[in-house]
Amino acid sequence: MFTQLSLRLRVFLFFVLLALGGTALVIGALWVGHSRALTSDVTNGFVFAGILSAFGLVGLTAGIWLLFDENVAKPIEKVAATLRTRAHAGVEAEVDAQAARYLGDLAPAAEAVSAALSETTMTTAQQVAAETARLADEKAQLTALLTEIPVATMLVNASDQIVLYDGQAADVLAQLGVPRLNAHMDEYFDPASLQDARAKMHKTGKDVSFSAKARDHRQSFTAKMRPMEGGGYMLVIDDAELTMAPDAARPLVYDFALLESRQTAAIEDMPLMDLCFAVFDTETTGLLPHKDEIVQIGALRVLNGRIVPGEEIDLLVNPGRPIPPASTKVHGVSDAMVAGQPDITHAGRVFHDFARDAVIVAHNAPFDMAFLHRYADRIGVAWDHPILDTVLLSAVLFGASETHTLDALSERLDVTIPDHLRHTALGDARATAEVLVRILPMLHAQGMERFGDVLEQTRRHGRLLEDLN
C-alpha cells in the first residue's frame, strides 16, 4: 500500500514521523522526569527528563535518517547513476524498479524518458553503424595495400610523436622497443640522425634520404623522410629485416587526432580525454605483495578515449619458485607455462616502457603496484606514473555504498568478460580498459574535465581501498 503513495507524500510522512515521534519522546521523558521528581529532588527530575529527551531525539533522528537513506536517498542515487550510464556510456541498463519502489513516479518517468531517447537515437545509431562499417572496409583495404608494399611506414606529427604506423613499422618498432602511438621518435631512433634529416627536409622542402640509426646504435635503417602539412613528416624504411611471418596479421594503427601537437601542461591540468592510459593487471602466486611473486602481466593502452588496437602486452613471468596449486586453479598459470620465461626484471622493464608517458590504471591498483614497487630496484626503474583506480572511479560515479568488484562494475557498464579470460592478466586488463572507456565520458559529463578534478574526487574514497586490501 505504501508503494502507491506519491513521493511528496512519502517525504511529508518522514517529517510527520519525526514530529510525532519527537513529541511522544518529549512527553514520555517529561512523565518519567515528573515521576522521578515526586520521589526525589525536583531539579534532578527535570534534568533527567532533558537528558532522556535528548538521547531519544538523537536515536529517533538516526532511525528516520536510516529509513530515508535506504528508501529515498540511495534509490535516487541509483536512478541517477543508471541514467548517467545510459546517457554517457551507451549502456542499455534498465532502472531498478525494486530499488526505486518508494520513489513514486520518478523511476517510471525516468525509464520512459530514457526509452524515448533511445528510440529517437536508434535511426542515427544505425546510420553511424553503416558508416562505421564502410570506414572499416576502407581501412581493411588500405591495410591490405600497405601490407603488399615491402616498406615500413610511419606518420609523425610536428612534435615528433607517432600518429600512424603500419604492420611493417610495428615490426621495426618492436625491434627497438614497444610500438606505441603518441610515443616520441627519440625513444626508438638516434635523436641526432633524426634532427639532421629534419633540418635538411625543412630547408629543402623535399624528401630526404638518410640512415636512421637505432637509439642504442646497434642497428641502422635506410630511411626516407617526407614533409607533411602542419610540420610533421612521413618516415619510410625500406630495408628493415622484418621478423613478422609473411602471412601474419599486420594491423594499421593510427589516431589522426594526434596530428595536432598538444601544448605540454602539468598532468593535473591536462584534459581527461587527452590523456594516454596504460591499463594493466597482474596474476600472482598469492595475495601477499611483500612475499608473493608475479606470474603474468597483461596491459592495453587507451588513447583519446578508445582502446588502441594491437597495442597490448601479455607476458608470462617466471617467479623463480613453484606456483601453489590453489593459485593455478584461479588464474590457470602453471609451473610448466612459466618454465623458461623471463623473470620480473625483463617483464617489468617491458611494462615500464609500455606505460611510458601514460597514466597507469588498474582495478585495486595498490595491490598490483605494491608488487612493482617491491621489484623497482631489481628492475632498475622508478614507478612514478600517475595512478587511477577503477574501484575509486566506480565509487565517484555510483556511490560508495555500491559493490565495486570488477565483475559488478562490468555488469553495471555492460562489459562482458568471457569465462575463459576471467582471472587472466590480459582478460582482466581488457575488461578494466573497456570499463575505463565507458567511465571517461561519464566523468566528463559530471564536470570532471581535468585529470586533477578526477584525482580530487577519488581521494575522497581512499578508505575503500584500505578496507579492500
Image (cartoon, helix red, strand yellow):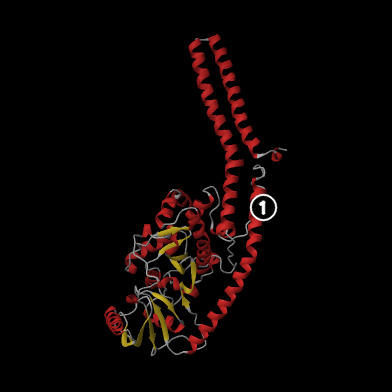
Residue 228 pos. (x, y %): 38, 80
Given residues 373 and 151, the one toward you in this image is: 151
Secondary structure category for the residue under label 1:
helix
Picture quarter with the N terminus:
top right
Residue 441 pos. (x, y %): 51, 59
Residue 382 pos. (x, y %): 33, 64
Given residues 236 and 28, the one toward you in this image is: 236
Q: Is residue 56 above or below residue 196?
A: above
Residue name at image x 59 percent, y 49 percent: 78
Looking at this view, name the residue that lies furthest to the right.
1
- Circle 1 Cα neighbour tier, 10 Å, few/some/many (<14 / 14–19 / ≥20): few
Q: Is residue 403 above or below residue 174?
A: above
Residue 12 pos. (x, y %): 62, 33
Q: Dividing the picture into quarters, in which one does residue 350 lie?
A: bottom left
Which amino acid type corresponds to the residue marked 1 in the rendered image?
Ala
Residue name at image x 60 percent, y 41 percent: 72
Whether residue 251 is visible, yes or no, is yes
**Where is mark 1, residue-wise?**
112
Q: Dividing the picture into quarters, in which one does residue 388 lie?
A: bottom left
Given residues 396 and 58, the one toward you in this image is: 396
Task: Please state if 60 lies on the left or on the right of 359 as rendered.
Answer: right
Task: Please state if 287 lies on the left or on the right of 356 as rendered.
Answer: right
Q: Is residue 139 above or below residue 123?
A: below
Q: Is residue 82 above or below residue 373?
A: above
Residue name at image x 42 percent, y 63 percent: 360
Residue name at image x 46 percent, y 85 percent: 244
Whether residue 216 is visible, yes or no, is no
